[in-house]
Structure formats: C-alpha cells, structure tokens
Image (cartoon, rainbow, N blue to C red):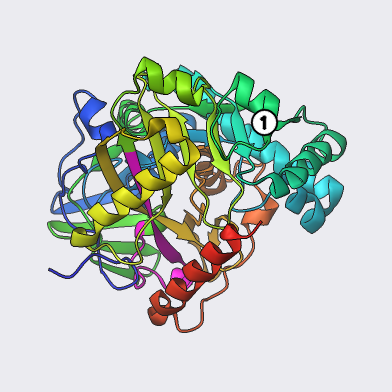
Amino acid sequence: MKPYDPIFADTPGTGLGYPGSYWTATSGPVPADDGVAPVAVDTDIAVIGGGYTGLSTAYHLARRYGRQVTVLEANRPGWGCSGRNGGFARMAFGRLSFSDMVGRFGRDGARRLFGSTMASLDNVREMIGDGAIDCDASEAGHLKIAPKASRAGALEAEAEVMRRELEYPAEYLPAAQLQRDHVGGTQSHGALRIPDALAVHPLKLSLGVLRMARAAGAAVHSSSPVTAWQKNGATHRLTTPHGIVNAREVVIATNGYTPTALHPELRATLFPILSHIIVTRPMTDAEIAGSNFITGHVMTDVRKLMFYWRRLPDRRILFGGRGLIADTPWRNANHRDYLLRELIAKYPALDGITVDYDWHGWVCFTRDFLPRIRRATDDPTVHYAVGYQGSGVSLSLYAGRLLAAQIADDAGEAGIDAARLPLARFPAHALLRIPQRAMFYWYRFLDSRG
C-alpha cells in the first residue's frame, strides 16, 4: 500500500482507529459521537475536520450563537494531530519568535499579536474549566533551551525584548540555574523561561471538546470524509461515502491532513511535514538523579530542526522532533531509535532507557510560516483555519472560537490581523518532497555548528 501523503491523497482514510500512542493507551473510554453522516443532511454550517479547530468551532457556534452545526470527520474525532501532539499548550503564533513579532509588526502590532497568543492560552484554560475536561492539565511554563553555549546569548536578548517591548515577565536562566532547578544534561546551556504554558493530555482534551460540542447541540459524524464538493447557488453540497450534506456555510479545519484538491483557495498553499514522538518507560530514581530531570515545564530547543520534550506525570519522558520525509512504516523504527539517541545525547544518565510508545502525525506549514484564520477570498461563506506550524494546541482551539465569531458576525470578538493575510502558493507543490530532503540536510548542518 502506498504511504499516505496529504499532498497526493484525497482523504486520510475512512473510519481508521486511533494510533498506537501513549495518549491512546491512557485516554480511557472514548465518548460516543453521532456515527456516520446519514444519507441526507441540511445544516447551517458544515465543518470539515473533527480535531481541535473543528470541534471548537462547532462548540462555539452551537453554544454561543445557537447555530446548527454538522462536523464531518474522516476517521474519529481527535484522530489527527489534535490527539497525537505533545500536549504543549503555549503562547505561539506559527514560527515567529517574540523578537520576530516586534521586528515584523512593530511594537504596537507585536503587542496586539502577543495579546492574541495570551488569549489563546486563556481560552484553553476556559474551555477546560467550562467543560470540566479531565485532561491532566498542569500549569507548566515553557523553557526554550540553548543546546550550545553559543546560542544562549540570543535567548537572553529575547527575554529582554519580551520584558521591554511586550511588558511580559520572561526571564533568562543561566546554565547553572537551569541545571539546578529544572534539568541537567550536556545540552542545557541556558534558557528563556516563559511562565505561561499548560501541559495537557491532548487526546483527552480532544475528547472533552467533543463532549462539549455535542452537549451544545452540534452533530459530530465520524467515518465521514468529504469526497466531493460542489456549490449550487447559495448551497454547498458536500458528498460523503454515505450521502450528501447541504450547508449554507463551510469551515475547513483539516490543517496538516488537508487534501490538495479540497478547495481551490488552499490548493498548493500547505506543506504537510511529519512529526514523530517517542515516550520512554518510567525513569528510575537513579536516572532522575543523574539527569536532574525534575522540571514540570514543557521544553523546546533552539534549532532549525527543533526537538520538544517534557516529563510526564508517571515519570516517563515524551520526546519529539521532525519525522521522516514520507510515512514509510519500515523506516519508522529507525526513526524511533534516532530520537532515542538524541534524547540520550542530551541526558547521558538516561543511557539504557527504552521506548514504550512511538507515533507520528502531519503538521502543517505555510510558505511564510504564519497561521491563517480567515474567509476564502472569492467566497465569504467558506472559512478556514490552517497552518499552525507544529505549535497549534492553543491557537487551534482559539481559532475555532474566532471562526465561530466570524461566521456569526460578532464584532465583539476581535480577530488576528496577521492571520487574515492571503495564502501564497508553493511553486511545484507536487514536487516539494524533493527540496524538503535537501532542506533537512542543510538544517541539520546548521544545527551542528557552534
């Protein structure tokens, strides 16, 4: 069977089960959805995609605005990256650093954008509280770590920019303080500490939002990919394997799993890239002592090919990074071993630790590395949120809230100006896997330099 690749495939599948991840193994009973979409459905708004964005959109439309909403999910709610990610709910807008925000949008624009990222994190907290979602949420903070001493100065400067320009209490932790209070190892040469972040169980969070959306009155249909889309007059006609869904408005919430031919607005504008995660067995007392891996913060490092990791509540370590070029099953085991070697390179005291779980999923990049939350250029009844650049836990849930307000013409819910820009197309989109390989080699070379 040919490996799935969103650039070429029409759908990610139909009715597939959740991956064999740590999250799947620990999520508990999966709540009911509304089953496959029936033969004929008439609805106010059809939402394509049942992850964070789609479920949040459905919840807010039904709960806040009383709209009739039908969610169409190809496999199961939370099946994509919403149930596969590392569970880092933090303040992020694409690949922009906070210094980048100031340089690109000026002080006032950066402050507005930063305020939106703070609002996105607050929205996660609010939804968890409103839905009484048991997703192992903890106030974690975010450590952005310098893996080489030569990169620590940039993090110290970033902390200063955040304090001065954004009036946010970021702090720089020198290597000794980082290794004493948070985590040791050979690649902990200082860190930017951002106090605001949550660590969550991502699949439990997805399933909690599923419950909220259905309780608010939205219908959520699994095993219902959209296989064709036509517009007849003012009505969107969406074909599923079982029938037709007629809707006045449509939301595209498929992110890294967006078929290239789904809608002309998105054709050749998205670059899906695999991200791969391992989860180790629980650390022993000696391993914890040897690495001083005591922090509850979520962590990323300063690399072109970034790693991300955290300690889980049961003393395991979650460690992730870029995945393979193609989803080739026989090579996934090799990539699992590669990630384990990189983890041990950071923390030699963990030599001998083993991997209990590994899985992967598609994250979504745009040409300018910025997310989009907007209406289609040529059809105001089509809305989409895509391109979270691998940092979408907070923003995707917030995007659902913003899309709902956009559909309801709620002027009281401010959008994000930087997310309304038109999408640029990738040249030779069908051939992107070829330069991607060269890009990864180049980035690995840059990451190896001092």
**Left or right: 74, with 94 as reference point:** left
Give the x, y percent position of residue 95.
Answer: 60, 53
- Residue under circle 1? 194
- Which element type, helix, strand or loop, lies under badge 1? strand
**For residue 104, which quarter of the picture?**
bottom right
Question: Measuring 81% from the left and 55% from the top, which residue is drawn there?
Answer: 103
Q: Is residue 112 visible?
A: yes
Give the x, y percent position of residue 331.
Answer: 24, 60
Q: Is residue 45 visible?
A: no
Question: Measuring 62% from the left and 60% from the top, which residue is drawn there?
Answer: 449
Q: Nearer the viewer, residue 69 or 330?
A: 330
Relative to 437, is 76 above or below?
above
Q: Is residue 275 magenta?
A: yes
Which image quarter is the C terminus in? bottom right
Q: Is residue 364 magenta?
A: no
Most extreme residue toward the bottom is 428
Q: How many marks?
A: 1
Relative to 394, is 326 above or below?
below
Question: Measuring 38% from the left and 46% from the top, which residue is drawn there?
Answer: 341
Q: Nearer the viewer, residue 272 or 265?
A: 272
Question: Measuring 21% from the left and 35% from the top, which residue is drawn there?
Answer: 33
Relative to 227, is 184 above or below?
above
Give the x, y percent position of residue 277.
Answer: 35, 44
Q: Amino acid at mark 1?
A: Ile
- Specify start and end residues of the magenta stretch as a single range: 257-278
Give the x, y percent position of residue 105.
Answer: 79, 55
Q: Nearer the viewer, residue 20 or 299?
A: 299
**Left or right: 176, with 127 as reference point:** right
